[in-house]
Image (cartoon, coloured by chain):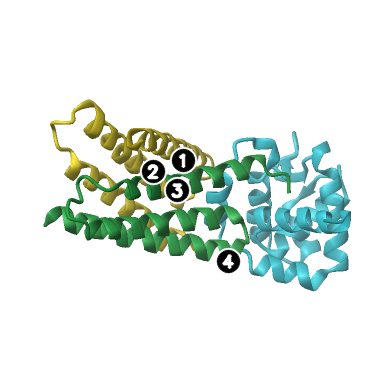
Amino acid sequence: MAPAVYILGTLICLCSAVLLLRAYRQVRRRLLLWSGLCFVGLTISNALVFVDLVIFPDIDLYRFRLVAAAVAMLLLLYGLIWESE
Amino acid sequence: MTDEERTRNDVDRFLQEKIDTVPHLEALLLAWNSRPRAWSAEEMANRLFLSADDTRAILNDLVGEALIAKAAGIPESYLYEEEASRSELLANVDLIYRRELIRVTRLIHSRPSASVRAFARAFRLRKESD
Amino acid sequence: MIDGFLLGLIAMASIIAGIFFLKFWRDTRDSFFLSFGASFVIEGLNRSAVLFTDKPNEGSPWTYLIRLLSFLLILIAILRKNYSNN
């Protein structure tokens, strides 16, 4: 169950990242850049959960997952606070 | 939903997604109502009571939204970009703007920032439904 | 300790981001932002809850299920943006 959830999450985040960065290339609004990069980070974080739980169960990647998600969320907050007006 | 409500919804959505200010709407409707005539920025500025620089910026925004095109062969002039699937919508925009001036003006003033709209629009895959 | 700090940071940032999206929903009346906002707020609360479990690393089935819900909200937002005809 858990691996399926994270595969789905990885795909959804990847899709969001691609759409936002594609739109950033077209319209150059920096909110799209920061939020696109946020979803890149969330994609990595979710993919790492899958790698952690399924591919390398004996290596603990928990902290890397958290760092990726934390960086991602800070990028998004930066964009929302400074670029959404 | 009645046809009238649906029309008003379509118009409101168009205004919120594409139109930054009331002068943007007026410039677009001027080009639409006089299509296929091409306008220089100065000519349009005189009609809209704006400076030529402001008008140029507005026209370039509308070009960015593919509502207005630069006229081929004539430097610095602009015309409505013909698009069959949009004709009915623009006719309704024109009508509703004249009938509901105050409501439409308020709607445009309360619109969310262009960045926020661009965020939502980024998730639309099909270009033509913009 | 560091993990707890990171987890708290993610939780807090998710909730704040969610509130931004809910504000965009209020401004645009576009339900896309309602789904997005709900997704980030739910995920933020979910992360906060993990902070108080004994083994945050493992996570309970509830963590996955709630995360699934938050992913599905984003998926629904994207699908509705593309397949609704209003």
The dot on residue C26 is 4
Q: Nearer the viewer, residue B118 or C21?
A: C21
Tell me if residue B82 can be seen: no
Above or below for A67 versus C11:
above
Residue C71 position in % (x across, y down):
44, 45
Horizontal side, residue A5 vs residue B77: left or right: left
Q: Which residue position is annotated with label 3?
A: C69
What is chain B's hue in the picture? cyan
Q: Give the colour of chain C.
A: green
Q: Is residue B51 above or below residue B63?
A: below
Q: Residues within 10 Å of mark 4 (few under 14, many from 20)?
A: some
Q: Are marks 3 and 2 on the same chain?
A: no
Figure chain in yellow:
A
**Crowd tier of the residue under label 2, counting other residues whose Cα lies within 10 Å: few below 14, some 14–19, many 20 or above:** many
Q: Disc 4 versus disc 2: distance between alpha carbons?
A: 23 Å
Q: Which mark is residue A16?
A: 1
Give SS at disc 2: helix
Q: In the image, what residue type sits under mark 2? A: Phe
Rendered residue at 33%/33% (across/down):
A3
